[in-house]
Structures are given as structure tokens and as C-alpha cells.
Image: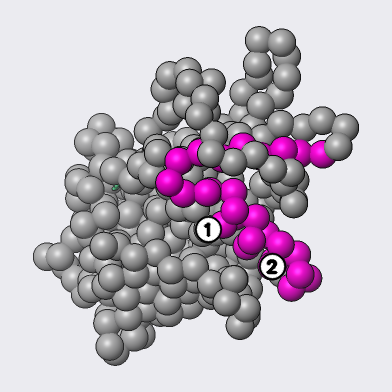
Amino acid sequence: MALRCCNCSTPTTVIGMIEELEPADGHTVLEIGTGTGYSTALMCHRLGEDNVTTIEVDPQVAARADAALEEAGFSTWTVTGDGLLGHPPRAPYDRTIATCAVRRIPYTWVRQTKPGGIILATLGSWPWGTGLAKVTVQEDGTAEGRIIGRSSFMQARSQATAPLAGDLSARTAYADTERPAKVPPTLLDEWTPSFLAQLSAPGAQLVRATADDGTKLLHLFDPERESFAAFTEDTAGWTVRQGGPVALWDGIERSLMAWQGAGQPDIGTVRLRITERSHVYWIGKEPVLRWEHRVA
Ligand SMILES: C[S@@+](CC[C@H](N)C(=O)[O-])C[C@H]1O[C@@H](n2cnc3c(N)ncnc32)[C@H](O)[C@@H]1O
């Protein structure tokens, strides 16, 4: 049985994730992202093949995993489809685990997980700076928990970010403001600041490019909100030009400065509450370190 389906998941991280799922005898599990079937096989071994339901969006990958699982002796429930919808026919589950990254935890997963049950999923839309969320479903239909550490997986297909096309200089031609940046945008090379930037400006993409004259360019684009921030560096430091209805960098910068002021807490201090309508993230009690993402 093959162990890898892509570069983002290693057997070690998958094992660590399954441990975080706190599986116990008799638990039922919903897995999103069957991939090779490796993590599915581990959970079948621990919980029994009938207690594991796994969903894979790619029919060929699903067929390969199903065959590999059969070969390994597990006739489990391999479903082909969009895992963001969960799998209602076998719900509710004691545990839900996603081995692909999501921008937000679909409320369908909360609905399909029993009260007291755990949902584990990688949150974020950038290729780095993503966090592993562990939340427990409450009796009132909400889910609460925190980001328990760094995690990196390929994006769930239907939530994947479309790569930006076209001329970057045209996208940044009309700036509304220009000023020195108060924190260097290179802070976004670090994992936790990068995660906080995604909380501050969900939908923004960080793009690095090189101009014809060799100058390194750094941009943030939010195509949905038609906004951008473009950075340039000289001997005096970084300058940011911003355009569009949302000053992307203003919000990110405020969060990063508050994070620095709070002593640069680790990603593991980010707490999370999910309701049908929103995801609320926060660190401590500082209002600037609180982000609400509403579904509508
Ligand atoms: C990192 S791999 C999964 C690794 C897997 N757990 C293993 O042990 O091999 C991510 C998988 O998620 C699948 N995927 C992406 N979006 C999905 C979606 N919306 N629903 C179900 N599967 C999805 C991809 O096709 C890919 O096979």
C-alpha cells in the first residue's frame, strides 16, 4: 500500500493528528481526504473498519485508496464526493478529521459530530502559516477549542484559492495611500504572524515576484474585495501602497503590532468558537487580537 499522495502530509503528522483525535473503543470517525488510505487504515486498525467513513473528492484517488484498503484487509466506507458536505447517512460521528486544509470548518461537520465529539482540521488558505484546529462540539450546536499547533495540508478542492492571473503592475496601478510600514511585511515569513494575517484579512493572498529590473516585490491581493497592498524596501525601510475599498495592510499591521505587544504568543494560544454563522478567533483579552469571520 502506497503511503504518500502528495508532499503535504507525512505519516508522522498523520499519526500525530490521529492521536490528537483521542480515539477510543467504539468511536465512529468521519475522515475528509482519503488520499492514499494510509490514515484511514490506521483508524480502521484502531477502531474497526465499520466505524470509519472516509471521503475523497478525486474519483481516481478514491478508487486507488479503496483497492489499497481492501488489500490491507479493511472493507471500510470509502465515499467519493465533496467532504465539505460531510456524509449525513452515517452521521453523527464521534470524531471528524480533515487531512486537507480548509478556510473555515464547514458547519455541516459540526452538525454531523456528536456533542462532546472532536473535530480536527487544518485552517488557513496560504501554503504556510496554517493552524491545526481542535474543537469540541457543544450541546448547543456550537464548537469550541483552539489552534493546537502548526499544520500544513493541501487545500480542500472546493475552497482552494484560484491562482492570481494577469499583470501585477496593473493590479497595483492605482493606490489610494502610501506610507511607511510600521512592521516589516517580511514578518509574514514567520508561521504565527502569517496565521494572524490570514485571520485579519481572510481572502488575501501573499504574492512574491521579481520586477524586470530585479527588484523583489511583495504584494497582498484580495481579489474578492478588489484591494491590494504593495510593498517596497529601501534603505529607510518598507513602504506600503494600498488600494481598493479595504486597507488590507492596516488591519494586518494592527494585529501584528498587538501580537508583538503581547509578547509574540505562539499559534497555540489562538482560541476558536464556531457557530452556524461565524468563526471567532481570539488571543487573550486584547480586542485587537480578536477576529470574527461571518459566513454571511
Ligand atoms: C494530504 S492528502 C490526504 C492524505 C491521506 N489522509 C493519507 O493518509 O494519505 C489530501 C487529500 O484530500 C483530498 N481532497 C481535497 N479536497 C477534498 C474535498 N473537498 N473532499 C474530500 N477530499 C478532498 C485530495 O484529493 C487528497 O487526496
Task: Determine the residue positioned at 82% across, 39% down.
Answer: 237
Mark 2 and ligand 1: say if the CB distance to the nearest ligand atom is below 8 Å.
no
Ligand 1: give its quadrant: top left
- Residue position marked by numbered label 1 in the rendering: 200
Q: Nearer the viewer, residue 261 or 180?
A: 180
Residue 286 in the figure: left or right of residue 49: right
Task: Determine the residue positioned at 27% across, 82% down.
Answer: 141
Q: Is residue 10 above or below residue 169?
A: below
Q: Nearer the viewer, residue 253 or 193?
A: 253
Q: Which numbered disc flags the more N-terminal residue, 2 or 1?
A: 1
Locate residue 215: give its quadrant. Answer: top right
Q: Given the current orientation, which residue lies at the most extreme left position?
A: 89
Measured Cα–Cα span from mark 2 to mark 1: 12 Å
**Rendered location of residue 256, percent (x, y):** 67, 59
Counting the numbered discs, the total is 2
Q: Secondary structure at mark 2?
A: helix
The N terminus - image quarter: top left
Q: Is residue 34 magenta?
A: no
The C terminus - image quarter: bottom left
Q: Is residue 17 visible?
A: yes
Q: Nearer the viewer, residue 95 or 285?
A: 285
Q: Amino acid at mark 1?
A: Ser
- Residue position marked by numbered label 2 in the rendering: 258
What segment carries the magenta color? Answer: 237-264
